[in-house]
Amino acid sequence: MGRFGSVGQLSLAALISLGLLWANGMAWAQTIADGDALSAGMTVEAIKDRGLLKCGVNVGLAGMSSVDPQGNWVGFDADFCRAVAAGVLGDGELVEFVPLSASVRLQALTEGAVDLLARNTTWTLKRDAGMGLSFPGVSVYDGQGLLVWNSTPGEKAKDLPAGTRVCLQSNTTTARNIEDVIKARNLPLVPVFHNNLNDARAGFFQMECQAYTGDRTALASLVMAEAPRARDIRILPDVLSKEPLGPVVREGDDRWFDIVRWTLNALIQAEEYGLTRANVDQVAAKASNPPLRRFLGEDPGVGASLGLDDHWVRRVISQVGSYGEIFQKNLGDESPLRLDRGLNKLWTEGGLLYSPPFL
């Protein structure tokens, strides 16, 4: 939950109405009023009545969700929002992207400011049980890493000089992980906590710290998009934690949970079938394999149980692409980050991505 100091007892809605909620130094204004049907079991109806999916995203993290020079939201998480909108509303562009800082992202979801959170958020026990939230699945398997100045000796975390200062944001899983791993591995690190992400990054770039820690995707993004002296820093090979990132919804709406979960599964299964934005219509027209025909809506079966039509999967693929296309475009070889897929490969290729059957 977010921490707001002296206004900590106010609800998110109250903070919004008073103009007191800020994300990354910029005022974030989001109206919850007008009676959107946000009670349990009615999320889809609210989205259809509104004609827009309200999707919470990062305020700016290259590869995951950020605004390009043309003013368009781009990135893996942004494309996942579009995939859900394509399935539910028929058009992947019917998304209202709501930029959220880490400190308010979960509260924004629980209080109804967004329908879906797709913001590089780690699935943990505490978040999944007891906070009124549910994680439909893992969209990116990540891990926490360390970014260090080249002037700091050491090839791995254990080799860094004693007392190496590490800048990071407080009240995050990153903070809890670094404290745990220092004790568990006896690492020579001293955490330097900051109240927000910008301050933590600034502390590192101003050389207040010799290291900076975060998810490895975020570190790669930082080096590529924001580092003032990218050639002077390096990412160590250490993986300090498991960071299963994924979409988040409110508890209590099973239909909405299922739609988001099976949208993720559809992206994964589409890649396994070899489907792409370019070929999906052609494949559908010629498909004779019963599971593939059902998957693409040529035969009935994938829509009714979700309250959707049978062509929703085909729309998702034709408008957004398969999982592999989304990953490669935003994070992989076709992106500036050029991240190896690693665990994010299909199970048939040695990775962890695996969709249950569409039966």
Image (cartoon, rainbow, N blue to C red):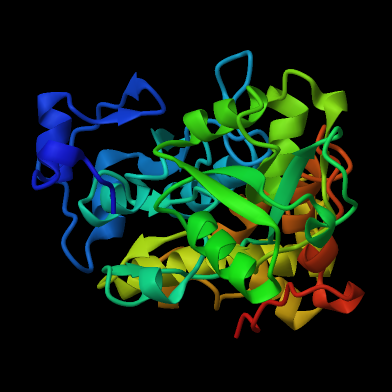
**Residue closer to the observer: 282 or 84:** 84
Q: Residue furthest top?
A: 70
Q: Residue 344's quadrant in the figure?
A: bottom right
Expressed as whole percent of the image width and height from the top left, the position of residue 287 reads 81, 69
Q: Determine whether 32 is above or below 322 in the image.
A: above
Q: Relative to residue 87, is residue 359 depicted above or below? A: below
Quadrant (top left/top right/bottom left/bottom right) for the N terminus = bottom left
Q: Is residue 207 above or below residue 132?
A: above
User: At x 17% / y 32%, what residue is drawn?
Assistant: 16
Image-quadrant location for residue 50: top left
Query: Toward which corner of the image does residue 100 lie, by quadrant?
Result: top left
Across and down, in percent, residue 227 comes to 72, 24
Q: Is residue 49 left or right of residue 342?
A: left
**Residue 271 x, y percent position in the rendering:** 79, 63
Q: Nearer the viewer, residue 224 or 258?
A: 224
Q: Quadrant of the C terminus?
A: bottom right
Q: In the image, 187: left or right of 95?
A: right
- Residue furthest front in the image: 162
Q: Would residue 66 be visible to someone looking at this image? A: no
Question: Residue sitting at 64 percent across and 82 percent down?
Answer: 356
Which residue: 42% across, 60% down? 248
